[in-house]
Amino acid sequence: MGVLKASGKLWSNLFHKPATEAYPAAPREYPSASRGHLEFDPSDCILCNICGKKCPTGAIRADKASRTVTIDRMDCIQCSYCADSCPKSCLSMAPGYTAPDSTKTVDTFTVPEREKPAEKKAE
């Protein structure tokens, strides 16, 4: 009986579309609610370190002295607490996931100096 069941499944698979998608040929579309991976835009960052204080694993560190923000990608659990608490919206969760790697990835971003607004003279 097992041979008859297998041959029936074989014939049905020959005339139906595959159950899987063509992943390498077409990029994957992630659901809108997926957290994905963390992205950082250093242009608006004020180095307040609220993101580092909110991170449960300590994966984000902001250093005012060296004007850098460090993100340890392997410690990040994609909880989005940092992105939700950032007052300048420098951090965001992008769709897609961090690619697996055999080495720990630590990204360090340099935050550019902000120009101070010119002082107005009292007239």
Image: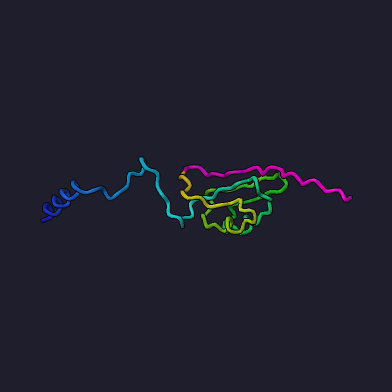
Residue 60 placement (x, y as % from top left): 60, 51
Tell me the residue at 27%/50% (across/down): 19
Q: In front here: 24 or 15?
A: 15
Q: In front here: 113 or 69?
A: 113
Residue 93 placement (x, y as % from top left): 53, 52
The residue segment tinted magenta is 101-123
Magenta residue check for 76: no
Q: In front here: 116 or 76?
A: 116
Tell me the residue at 10%/56% (across/down): 1
Magenta residue check for 102: yes
> On the picture, is 94 further left or further right than 44?
left
Quarter-of-image position of residue 51: bottom right
The figure's colour scheme reads: rainbow
> On the picture, is 34 further left or further right than 85?
left
**Is the magenta region chiefly helix, strand or loop?**
loop
Residue 58 placement (x, y as % from top left): 60, 55
Tell me the residue at 35%/44% (across/down): 23
Residue 5 placement (x, y as % from top left): 14, 54
Check the image and report above or below for 5 versus 112.
Answer: below
> On the picture, is 120 further left or further right than 101?
right
Disc count in the image?
0
